[in-house]
Image: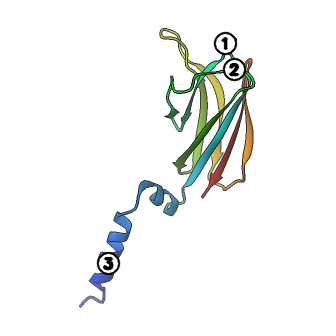
Amino acid sequence: MSNINTAICTSDTQLFTELTSEEGAVIEGGATLLLYRLTALNASDFNGDEIYIKVNGETLIPPGIVPDVDSGETININRAINFNGTAKLELFDDDVWGNSDDYLGGFSVGSTPTNGITSNIIRGSASYRILYQVIA
């Protein structure tokens, strides 16, 4: 004879099957990367860069969404990305058809919570500053 209360098992099953992917990531020990804004300290192209961002290989801001970003300009990103382990952020300049896009640099962050952090992304003549935060 079993001492398992089937009513409790059923409610637990419902609890854990109705989680969103974001809620599941938090339970699994995941974190959220909050990207606030990006400033072009020195754009790689004379007429500005057509910026797009990838996080863990997924395009966060697709090419063509952000117009030319000239040196000194700031764009608001205001996006949240859930991840487990580490998140790898990569910054690209979208080039015209037939040319490969320019990789402008990037960095990785862990799942340890942070306050607002400013990081510089520098590659060749291009330099950018990004403000972000990690929450658990």
Whole-percent x and y of residue 53? 57, 31
- Choose the circle earlier in sequence order: 1 or 3: 3
Q: Quadrant of residue 4?
A: bottom left
Q: Residues within 10 Å of mark 2 (few under 14, many from 20)?
A: some
Q: Is residue 27 above or below residue 99?
A: below
Q: Residues within 10 Å of mark 1 (few under 14, many from 20)?
A: few
Name the residue tied to disc 2: 70
Q: Quadrant of residue 44?
A: top right
- Choose the circle earlier in sequence order: 3 or 2: 3
In the structure shown, which secondary structural element does the residue marked by tag 2 occupy? loop
Name the residue tied to disc 3: 9
* Image quadrant occupied by the C terminus: bottom right
Residue plotted at (59% across, 46% down): 86
Q: Is residue 122 above or below residue 2?
A: above
- Choose the circle earlier in sequence order: 2 or 1: 1
Is mark 2 in CB contact (under 8 Å) with mark 1?
yes
Name the residue tied to disc 1: 47
Disc 1 versus disc 3: nearer the observer: 1
In the structure shown, which secondary structural element does the residue marked by tag 1 occupy? loop
